[in-house]
Amino acid sequence: MFKRLVDIGTPVTFDFEGRPLTAQAGDSLASALLANGVLDFRQAPEDGTVRGPHCMIGNCFECLVEVEGLGTRQACRERVRDGLKVRRHSGRPVPGEQP
Ligand code: FES
């Protein structure tokens, strides 16, 4: 389990899979999800195994999620915002996105 060490930002509420979660403005989406106990961010397209963040610096693409209105995003490179709606990435192409 990940735990926040310092509270420095304004509290924000966002939605993951229909569940309201809290974070602090400026947190990356990946760190906000991890701090809320979410470890599985997506399914591998090859075999459906669950995957989660690995590098936290934008290199591995293991942290892909679907953000409403934005499509597929690397959670470690996206800032959490109040009202953001996020879903696990299915591992399949998102309609309207380039493969
Ligand atoms: S955790 Fe590696 S790209 Fe996001």
Image (cartoon, rainbow, N blue to C red):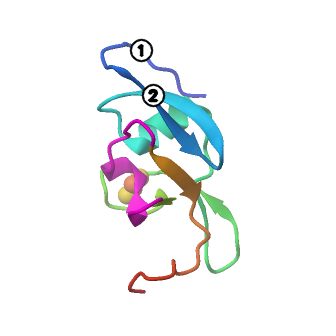
In the image, ligand 1 is in what quadrant? bottom left
Instruction: Using the image as rendered, state which of residue 66 and residue 68 is in the foreground.
Output: 68
Residue mark closest to the camera, 2 vs 1: 2
Residue 35 visible here: yes
The magenta stretch spans residue 55: no
Q: Which residue is drawn at 37% across and 13% down?
A: 7
Q: Does the magenta stretch include residue 77?
A: yes
Mark 1 closeness class: few <14, some 14–19, many ≥20 residues within 10 Å? few
Q: How far apart are marks 2 and 1 (CA)?
A: 13 Å
In depth, the one of 7 and 17 nearer the eye is 17
Residue identified by numbered label 1: 5
Residue shown at 39% from the left, 61% from the top: 73
Magenta highlight range? 68-83
Q: Which amino acid does label 1 sit on?
A: Leu
Q: Is residue 3 left or right of residue 58?
A: right
The amino acid type, in three-letter code, at marker 2 is Ala
Quadrant location of the C terminus? bottom left
Residue 33, x across and y down, in percent: 52, 39
At x 57% / y 32%, what residue is drawn?
21
Residue on which the image places disc 2: 23
In the rendered image, the vertical position of residue 89 relative to residue 22, given as above or below: below
Q: In which quarter of the image is residue 90?
A: bottom right
